[in-house]
């Protein structure tokens, strides 16, 4: 049977019962609109979650010096003092995927102001550290170049330290004593909260690395420029794996490691957080699939129901068509086309509704949404499949009618 | 060779499977009890009989809508009773035009498209379909009403559309089942005139009726009683 003729007769049959057709389509309309909206809002939400995850450090790597083996006893990471500030600079400059790299040294220290004191972590590092950690200042300023060079007695403090030492007074330009060295607070770090391990990240004092080495660390100054770790931030959109491999190659070159020998350093990243991120987006996808699947099945059952009614109602028409020469497959095709037309029109209206809903969510709730051509194609494909799948049984039933019984049907 | 050759046609209905064709109670209904019949090409035949006499059953078998329980039916030399449903559909499409008591036009569909229907199923292209359907409508005198839907046409006009549909594929046989049953006597005469004209142009016409004045239009009259032909007269 001619496809256009079948399509025309399908549209005519659907138009004959406009309200019924629309009610039937409602299931598909709601299903497709839900899918479109959920995908758009969902991908927006995923992007937001990724944004927040980045703040937690999913694109941060930590390069640590390798462990020292003393008399056969391996003393673990950071016991050897292999890495230097030059290594950090080399990583920042020579690895293309790297946005910033900051060397750091760390110690625990008692910090004193007037008659209050507080035990906290002291970091010696550079301004890049704040960039790597995406950690803005709440007030004050960062270190100046001269201060970095000249072991200036300046510090940035975290919110917890500020609260414990100063209470409600403004700590900027106040002097704190770190291991008896007086340093001036030049800035306060924004609140960052706990890290993945439950440690308070705001309980911190940051000083220039030269200040740390020359004034706070004490001990021999001989092992010049040795550092505890390098924090590396990978550029957005760049592969963590590629960055890690390049850093590894670069450092092996710098340390002149023989091929096959162990790395004298180790690279760590926050795989746990990345796994959590992957798991959350997987759950999101599953949720989407479940919602889409259920609503499309319900829509499909609606179509099957109404097509069965339609076949029964039009039994005489089927008999007439058979009398003038329609074969079983012509009748099958006709009712399948009708069912698919129904579901595709429903799908189209659903896409439209979904787009409106997406836009509404985007502009009123202020969420980041992104509607893709892919989700529209997915919705269209699904509605066509639903139409074929749920339209097949009624159509087959129609095609199996015997002409004489169909013609005589009352 | 006759257009229609029927030999010992028997049709038996078992109650339940096709209950609506059975007038009486009982497990088995013998609608046809061995009908032998030849109809020559170009003839005009009326089949008469009371309801339940088997005339409609014969009509359905002649129209390849139903198959006999036993017996042989050849239409234009082709043995029909062994054919599959799809082959029967093709035979109906090419060789037979049906006219029904209730017209059986598709609702909300223009006269033109109704007439085009058999051509759609024989795979004729749209332009030729339209031309042939218009020609058929012209033949029944409804050339300028081709865009009207059945609801906008009178009963007589609807039956003319149905006749146009029956003849659009140039069949050898037109089967009319009580074609005037739903029409007043004046319109009935018009419709019979139209069928008679078609017959004069060489088409074989078989009508089923229980009205003697309608049967009078035909050249040959068959009377059925209890599944058998009891009278076969030429006028």
Image (spheres, coloured by chain):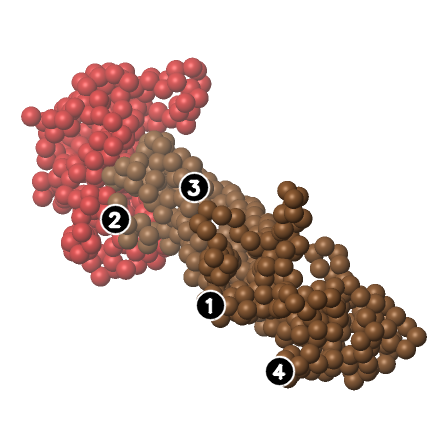
Chain colours: A brown, B red
**Distance from label 2 to label 3 (Cα)?**
22 Å
Left or right of A111: which side holds B132? left
* Residue at the spot 44% in from the left edge and 49% down from the top edge: A259
* Same chain letter for marks 2 and 4: yes
Chain-order first, disc 3 or disc 1: 1
Q: In this image, A364 relative to A248: left or right?
A: right
Residue A94: mark: 1
Task: Confirm whether circles 1 and 4 share one chain.
Answer: yes
Dot 2 falls on a residue whose secondary structure is loop
- Residue to which mark 4 is pinned: A145
Instruction: Provide the residue designation for mark 2.
Output: A2
Q: Are both tags, 1 and 2, on one chain?
A: yes
Badge nearest the viewer, 1 or 2: 1
In this image, B14 relative to A283: left or right?
left
The chain letter for the residue carrying disc 2 is A
Q: Secondary structure at mark 1?
A: helix
For mark 3, what is the residue?
A389
Residue A233, position as x, y percentages in the image? 56, 65
Snapshot quadrant of residue B134:
bottom left
Q: Residue at x 25, y 58 (%)?
A: B146
The vertical placement of A136 against A332, above or below, is: below
SS category of the residue bearing label 4: helix
Q: Which tag, 4 or 3, sits closer to the chain's start?
A: 4
Q: Chain of mark 3?
A: A
Residue A345 in view, yes or no: no
Disc on the earlier residue, 1 or 2: 2
In depth, the one of A40 and B156 nearer the eye is A40
At 20% across and 45% down in the image, what residue appears? B123
Q: Position of residue A23 (x, y in %)?
A: 53, 53
């Amino acid at each position: 049977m001619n496809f256009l003729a079948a399509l025309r007769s399908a549209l005519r049959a659907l138009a004959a019962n406009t309200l019924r057709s629309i009610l039937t389509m409602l299931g598909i309309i709601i299903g497709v609109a839900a899918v479109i909206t959920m995908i758009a809002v969902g991908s927006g939400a995923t992007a937001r979650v990724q944004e927040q995850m980045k703040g937690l450090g999913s694109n941060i790597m930590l390069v640590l010096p390798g462990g020292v083996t003393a008399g056969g006893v391996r003393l673990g990471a950071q016991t050897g003092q292999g890495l230097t500030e030059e290594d950090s600079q080399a990583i920042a400059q020579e690895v293309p995927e790297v946005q910033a790299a900051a060397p750091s040294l760390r110690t625990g220290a008692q910090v004193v102001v007037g008659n209050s004191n507080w035990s906290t972590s002291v970091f010696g590092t550079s301004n890049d550290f704040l960039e790597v950690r995406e950690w803005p200042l709440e007030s004050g300023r960062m270190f100046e170049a001269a201060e970095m060079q000249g072991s200036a007695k300046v510090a940035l403090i975290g919110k917890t330290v500020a609260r414990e030492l100063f209470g409600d007074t403004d700590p900027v330009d106040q002097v704190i004593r770190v291991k008896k060295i007086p340093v001036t607070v030049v800035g306060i770090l924004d609140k960052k909260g706990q890290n993945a391990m439950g440690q308070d990240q705001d309980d911190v004092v940051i000083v220039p690395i030269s200040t740390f080495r020359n004034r706070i660390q004490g001990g021999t100054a001989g092992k010049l420029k040795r550092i505890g770790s390098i924090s590396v931030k990978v550029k957005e959109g760049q592969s963590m794996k590629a960055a890690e491999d390049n850093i590894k190659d670069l450092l092996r070159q710098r340390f002149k490691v023989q091929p096959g020998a162990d790395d004298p350093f180790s690279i760590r990243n926050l795989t746990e957080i990345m796994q959590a991120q992957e798991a959350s987006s997987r759950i999101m996808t599953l949720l989407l699939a479940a919602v889409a699947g259920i609503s499309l099945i319900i829509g499909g059952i609606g179509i099957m129901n109404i097509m069965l009614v339609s076949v029964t109602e039009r039994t005489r028409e089927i008999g007439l068509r058979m009398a003038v020469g329609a074969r079983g497959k012509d009748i099958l095709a006709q009712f399948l086309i009708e069912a698919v037309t129904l579901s595709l029109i429903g799908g189209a209206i659903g896409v439209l509704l979904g787009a409106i809903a997406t836009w509404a969510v985007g502009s009123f709730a202020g969420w980041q949404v992104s509607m893709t051509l892919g989700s529209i194609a997915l919705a269209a494909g699904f509605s066509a499949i639903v139409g074929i799948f749920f339209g097949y049984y009624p159509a087959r039933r129609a095609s199996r009618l015997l002409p004489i019984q169909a013609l005589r049907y009352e | 060779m006759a257009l229609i050759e029927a030999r010992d046609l028997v049709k038996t209905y078992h109650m339940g499977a096709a209950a609506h064709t059975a007038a009486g109670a009982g497990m088995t209904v013998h609608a046809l009890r061995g009908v032998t019949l030849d109809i020559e090409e170009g003839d005009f035949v009326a089949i008469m009989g009371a309801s339940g006499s088997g005339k409609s059953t014969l009509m359905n078998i002649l129209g390849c809508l139903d198959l006999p329980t036993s017996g042989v039916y050849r239409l234009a030399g082709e043995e029909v009773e062994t054919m599959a449903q799809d082959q029967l559909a093709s035979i109906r499409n090419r060789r037979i035009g049906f006219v029904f008591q209730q017209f059986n036009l598709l609702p909300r569909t223009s006269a033109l498209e109704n007439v085009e229907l058999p051509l759609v199923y024989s795979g004729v292209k749209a332009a030729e379909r339209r031309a042939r359907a218009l020609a058929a409508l012209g033949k029944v005198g409804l050339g300028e009403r081709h865009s009207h839907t059945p609801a906008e046409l009178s009963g007589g006009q609807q039956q003319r559309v149905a006749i146009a549909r029956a003849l659009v594929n140039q069949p050898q046989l037109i089967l009319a089942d009580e074609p005037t049953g739903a029409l007043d006597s004046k319109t009935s005469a018009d419709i019979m005139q139209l069928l008679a004209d078609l017959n004069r142009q060489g088409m074989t016409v078989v009508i089923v009726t229980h009205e003697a004045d309608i049967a009078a239009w035909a050249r040959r009259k068959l009377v059925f009683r209890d599944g058998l032909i009891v009278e076969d007269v030429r006028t």
